[in-house]
Image (cartoon, rainbow, N blue to C red):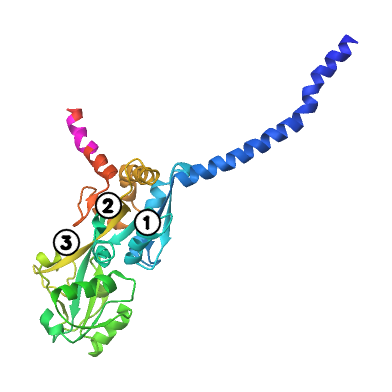
Amino acid sequence: MIRLIAALLLMAPLVLLPAAAQQAQQATRALSYEAMRERVNAWTVGMAAGLIEGAPLRLAAEMARVVDDGANLQVLPIVTRGPTENLNALLYLRGVDLAIINSDALEEYKVDVPDIQRHIVYLLNLFPSELHIFVRPEIKSLQDLAGKKVNFNTQGTAAAYSGPLIFSRLGINITKTFIPHPLALQQMRDGDMSAVVFITSKPVDAFLRGKWEPGFSFLPLTYDSKFEDYYLPATLDSADYPGLIEPGKRIPTISVPTVLVSYNWPVGSDRYSRVARFTEYLFGRIGKLQEPGSDPKWKTINLGATVPGLTRFPAAQEWLDRQARKPLANK
C-alpha cells in the first residue's frame, strides 16, 4: 500500500505538469509580448528622410543598417515630400526623432516659430550641396537673369526650395519654373530657358556627360554676409567639370549643408535617450559606412564639422569630447 501511494505521488507532478506548464507558458507569452512591445518602442527611432529618389533617403537607409541592434536600437527611415517636409515632420509628427534637412529649411519657420534654432540641434553635417547656376551663352552675369526663365527642378527638391530663396536674397526677380531638369536643359539648348539651378553635390552627371556648345557656363556667386546664416562658401573648378571650366580656373559659389538634426529633447528624457544611443552607435561605427558598398559621401564625412546657425546635440558633443581626450589619456 505504501508503495502504491509513493508511486501515485511520483506520478502526480507528471499528470499536473502539462496543464500547469500550459498556463505558465501562456502567462509568459503574454508578459513577453507586452515587454517586447515596450522594449522595441523604447529603442525605435523615426527618421524623416525625404523623397524616395533622393540621396538623403539612401543615406538614412545606410545609417539604419549600420546602427541596427535588434530590440536595442532600430531606425525607421521615413519617406516624405522633401527636405522642408522633413523639418515639419520633426516639429509636429508623432514618432519622428530625427530628420535630414537642408540648413536653410529653418527660414520657412521663422514667422511661426521665431526661436526655431532653440528647438532643433544637429548631430552631423552630412554633405554640402553646391549651388550650380548654369546659363546660356548670352547670360554673362546674375543681373542678366532678371526677368528671364530659370528652372529650379521639381517641387520637393533642394533646388526648388533653396534656389528661389537665394535669388530672393540677391534681389533678382526672375521667372521661376519647376519642371524636371532634363526637360529644362533641353529647353536651354533650344533657347527657351535661360538658366537652370542645381543644388546638389558636385560633380553633376548632366554637366559631365552632356555636350554643350561654347559659351554655356556656370555663373559665379560670391559668399558674403547675405549667406552667413545658413550657407557655406564653395567653389566649382576644372577638376569637377573639365569640359566646362578652363584648367586652373575656380568659380566661387555657395553650398547648402545637408544636415542630420534632432528635436532638442530635454536631457534625460526618453526621446533624448533614444537619440543619444543612436548617436553613440552611429559615431562609433562610422568606419563601416566608409567601406565599399555604401554611398561615397561617407568617405568625406567629418564628425566634427559644424553647421551654421545651429548648436550640436549634447550627446554628440560629449562623444567628440571623449575622443579628443583619448590621446591625452594614452600618453
Residue type (three-letter) at the residue carrying disc 1: Ala
* Labelled disc at residue 60: 1
Name the residue located 21 percent from the left edge and 72 percent from the top edge: 165
Give, as a single range, the part of the protein colored magenta.
322-328
* Quadrant position of residue 190: bottom left
Report the mark closest to the observer, 1 or 2: 2
Quarter of the picture holding the N terminus:
top right
> Is residue 70 rendered to the left or right of residue 146?
right
Does dot 3 land on a helix, a strand or a loop? loop
The residue under label 3 is 229
Q: How many marks?
A: 3
* Mark pair 1, 2: CA separation: 18 Å
Name the residue located 32 percent from the left edge and 81 percent from the top edge: 179
Q: Position of residue 123 (x, y in %)?
A: 28, 50
Residue type (three-letter) at the residue carrying disc 3: Asp
Among the two numbered marks 1 and 2 on one chain, the one whose residue lies closer to the N terminus: 1
Which residue is most to the bottom? 191
